[in-house]
Amino acid sequence: MTDLSVDVVVIGGGATGAGVARDVAMRGLSVVLVDRADLGQGTTGRYHGLLHSGGRYVISDPESARECAEENAIITRIHTDAVEQTGGLFVVTPEDSEEYSEGFMAGAAKAHMPAEEITIAQALSREPRLHKGTKRAFAVLDGTVDGWAMVWGAVESAKEHGATVLTYHEVDRIHRVGDRVTAVECVDRKAGGRITIDCRFVINAGGPWAGRIAGFAGCHDVDVVPGRGIMIAMNHRLVNSVVNRCIYPADGDILVPVHTVSIIGTTDVKADDPDNLPIPRNEVQQMLDSGAAMIDGFREARAVHAWSGARPLVKDNRVKATDTRHMSRGMSVLDHLERDDLHGLLTITGGKLTTYRLMAKRIVDIMCEQLGEDRPCTTDQEPVPTSRKTHNYKVTHRLEERDHQFQEDQIICECELMSRQMFTELAEENPDATLDDLRRRLRLGMGPCQGGFCSTRAAGLLCTNGIQDSAGATLELREFMKHRWMGLWPILAGAQVRQTALDEWIMRGTLDIDHAPGDENPPERYPVGVPADSEAVEVAR
Ligand SMILES: Cc1cc2nc3c(=O)[nH]c(=O)nc-3n(C[C@H](O)[C@H](O)[C@H](O)COP(=O)(O)OP(=O)(O)OC[C@H]3O[C@@H](n4cnc5c(N)ncnc54)[C@H](O)[C@@H]3O)c2cc1C
């Protein structure tokens, strides 16, 4: 049975797929975007938060550095609600050799990337917690970007231009007639049932799953290597600008201030399966050591959550198949007409969140050429709807908004200043959303208490506002806390142990969450599995 018929189906609602859907819709073609989960629940929701200036690549990959510098300016302009213009520093710590820094300014000039060497006194006045033994410092235009806000912005824009978006729809078949793709078939993971979408073209933006998706069309051996990296959120903003170690890309070399926390990352190890991403304790240790090399007092801060993501790296014959650190971070387009004699399918992988718009432009240009249509890209010209009325994001914005209405609206999440009205409005607009879906929009439970206080209030609101019955709200709460605790397990130490013991007492001792009404064996609603190895726990961010 055919349920929908469009020009283009985009598979994958991460940054790349959202950008492709927006681009296709803005060129006037009809498009459906499908994702097997919520938007941005793949790598895009498990990344570091850095809007690259290009500085990380000036020596190892000048082409990527130039692309980042150009896209940074565009993304800052069209996604104002998602981007904080923090600026960034590249610093030579007491543990680092100065070799890399010797070529930094020349590399920046070659990549047309703004950069300036500043004195240590200037660097310390910008970032007082910087290690007092810092040897050199360069100022760059790094920023931070909320990947979820960016994806929703792009998707809202796509919808405004006529796109349809189907979340929790998993593609498991791509139909072909002879040498041509004709339709995509998906299973509806929430409501059950299947739908078929007839189309002229399919763009596979499945990130680390892109190889598997290409296989549905009979295009085998698409070698996307998941490069696993872990990140750890520290309980407050230890820095207000991005701080990078000025060395060849290495583990734990970047500290990014994101909203109310700072995130240290990351590692880079080949994973076997993007659905099964461990967080080994030795890597946690490595991150904390590297943070301490950059920032005085790093270890006194509390690690509140850890997660792991998989870079969709395309296998590069120049390096060993397990050496993901040195695989290219550039984007990769697979033209299945050239590769497999199949019309109507392109795959796009690799790249970075910072360059998502450019990746979309490149692939949609190729698609238009294959369709024989002259439709220029305009995605750099129009801010997304969620950004039209705002200035660039400021970390203090919720405090400023609260100032005007703190008498009327109750705070539900103290860590993130999320109010009752913010929560109920979004929950009522999205009655099918899980508490975890709402978390990604509102940052519910993402601060130091990791949901200990706010999650019970939020679940209560679902119930009192008639969005869920008590059994449904209990189920939501259990699932939500399960995933919060998974991200705590590998990093539990110091003050966070006391916090977690308190949270557990609230949930188990006071609320008796395990015996409250609700299905005790609910179906798995999150696509990502948890490995049995207790030393290496997969987490949702
Ligand atoms: C540890 C780490 C740190 C990073 N840090 C940064 C950074 O600081 N700055 C930066 O610019 N970049 C960073 N990156 C890179 C960036 O996160 C990725 O390049 C980007 O998020 C990839 O987006 P994507 O849309 O291609 O893939 P994804 O976000 O993974 O999207 C793929 C989507 O496909 C969906 N899908 C899979 N199978 C199916 C199916 N059968 N049917 C339907 N849907 C399906 C998935 O659910 C998923 O949503 C980092 C990456 C990692 C791993």
Image: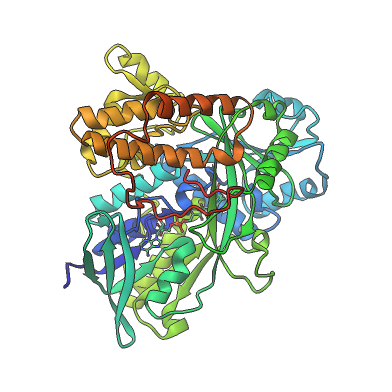
Judge from the rendering whether residue 481 lies leftward or rightward of residue 230; answer left or right.
left
Display coloring: rainbow
Q: Residue furthest bottom?
A: 178
Q: Nearer the viewer, residue 289 or 141?
A: 289
Inspect this view and state whether residue 53 appears.
Answer: no
Q: Residue furthest top?
A: 407
Res. 218 image quadrant: bottom left
Res. 477 image quadrant: top left
Q: Nearer the viewer, residue 298 or 125?
A: 298
Q: Quadrant of the N terminus?
A: bottom left
The image shows residue 56, relative to residue 482, as above or below, that is below
Judge from the rendering whether residue 68 lies leftward or rightward of residue 472; answer left or right.
right
Q: Residue furthest front?
A: 515
Residue 318 picture location, percent across and down: 68, 72
Q: Residue at x 48, y 58 (%)?
A: 275
Residue 451 picture location, percent across and down: 43, 30
Q: Nearer the viewer, residue 407 or 300?
A: 300
Q: Residue at x 58, y 48 (%)?
A: 534
